Amino acid sequence: MSSRLGKTTLVYFLTQVGATLIGGVATWYINFDLGPAAYGEYQTAVASLFALNIPASAIGIAVKKRVSEGEEQGAFLAAGHALNLAVHAVLVAGLLAFRGQVNTFIGLEVAVPFALLVGARAVFDVTVSSLRGYRQVGTSGAVKTLESFVRAGVHVGSLFFLGVGVAGLVYGHGAALVLATLAGVVVLDGRPTGFDARHVRELVDYARFAWLGTLKTRAFAWTDVLLMRALSLSIVGLATVTKTQIGIYRVAWTFASILALVSIAVKESLFPEFSELGVDEDYERVHHYLNEGLTFTGVFAIPGLFGAVAVGDRLLTIFGPEYAVGGGILVLLVAARLVAAYGAQLVNTINAIDYPDVAFRVNLGFVVANVVLNLALISLFGWYGAAVATGAASLVSVALAGYALTRLIGRPDVPVAEIAYQVAASTVMLGAVLAVQRVLPDTLAWTLAVVGLGAGVYTVALLALSERVREKSLGLLPT
């Protein structure tokens, strides 16, 4: 990975760390003020939002791809936003027309703000994708951080001063999206120009395959929540999942997602590069960059998995002692996110070199596996079944994507040695953490200190083992 790409990745990563920390504070306060059951209700509403957000995300991916190719950027930008607005005007109207059914499904009287939230999220997503298409990856991360900051501020402020419930959280979510979208439009390098039916057709041609990739992302993040809730309300499920368990499950998912931030930053930074190389069919360079991306995909998540085994249940008590029961769920979800991160790098490459039909088939395999496994395992094992199903479906995705990419451009050069170094450094870290835990008090404050110690041990061990990581780290330092 070049120094320029490394710095782009670092900027994007840091902005996402900021967004995650801000969101974590809000998540903590919501759980502290309303409890895990109410947080489970809000997360069910958010899961419904992202399920309805699939068209906007697919259009956004198409805009990112066409704009990143460097030709007629303004026309594709304008066509993408026009198409997005047209599709979601119909969707929002439908939600308002059937607001009674919407309220019944979500379980709250929030149909009107929910419909507006769906529209706001649609415009926000395409704006962020436009920034990435113009290679403003770091800026897109800053816009997402701004949205998280505003949303957290509104949520905490409204709960603290007004005492609002879940409906107020939905209103605050929508307001944050509108403000962040306006900021994104202001800083976007490109400006819309005239477009015609050809531009719309090329976007639709790409989006009709990309929508399943979006569905895969949404399914990975939210299928378990939707099916846990749906099966709990039906007579089909043999094992039931309470709203409280859903709330704790989503808190564990938030922790697991923090560890995937590096892989997401790498993926977003590499897409424009892969896209340009794909136009020239320079697959040798594609393999090089993919190898670099896979090297750093697990650099946080692998030690995170070892750490979750050692102190996961204690970390969750940040939200309250009742959250400690989610320790096993946290380990399973970190493992699922780690596997999914490698699969995402492979699918990202397939999409970027302009084989959306192949990515479509890979993503279809994941979605089918995810839904079938969740239905079966949640019914039998409750929330543990949901976590296992998510990880197993991710393994299916890695296998399918690896096979497909091999057929297209040759077998990916997997950096086995670098991954082994990360596992070895994580093992050293685990030994140090377990040794220190034996002599320290079993309190949250000391657990956080142990986490810091573990991070330091892992960093030193990895830098000692991996020459590539040492070189890349030095390349990120200011000159």
Image (cartoon, rainbow, N blue to C red):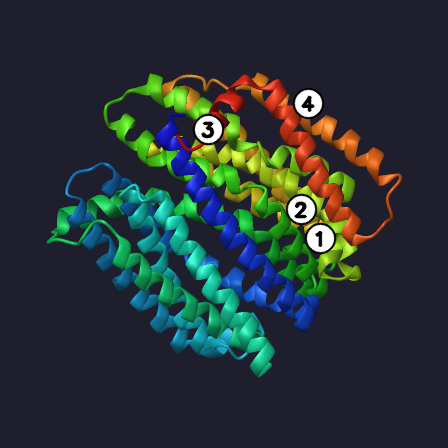
From mark 4 to mark 2, how far is it between C-alphas? 26 Å
Q: Which residue is mark 3?
A: 293
x and y percentages locating residue 44 in the rendered image: 58, 64
User: Vertical placement of 463 versus 217: above or below?
Assistant: above
Return the mark for residue 424: 4
Q: What residue is shown with label 1?
A: 383
Q: Are marks 4 and 2 in contact (CB under 8 Å)?
A: no
Percent across and percent down for residue 471 are 49, 21
Tell me the element at label 4: helix
Eye-nearest disc, 3 or 1: 3
- The amino acid on which the numbered mark 1 sits, given as a three-letter code, is Trp
- Residue drawn at (14%, 46%), measured in percent from left and top? 198
Please name whichever residue, 307 or 477, is drawn nearer the observer in this view of the structure: 477
Secondary structure at numbered mark 1:
helix
Mark found first going from the N terminus, 4 or 1: 1
Q: Amino acid at mark 2?
A: Ala
Q: Is residue 354 visible?
A: no
Q: Which residue is denoted by mark 2 in the rendering?
A: 387
- Amino acid under label 3? Gly
Q: Please state if 283 lies on the left or on the right of 9 as rendered.
A: left
Q: Earlier in the sequence, mark 4 or mark 2?
A: 2
Q: Tags 1 and 2 in contact by the CB under 8 Å rule?
A: yes
> Of callouts 4 and 3, which one flags the residue occurring earlier in the amino acid sequence?
3
Q: Residue at x 49, y 51 (%)?
A: 218
Q: CA distance from mark 2 to mark 3?
A: 26 Å
Assess whether mark 3 and mark 4 are in contact (beta carbons under 8 angstroms): no
Q: Is residue 113 visible?
A: yes
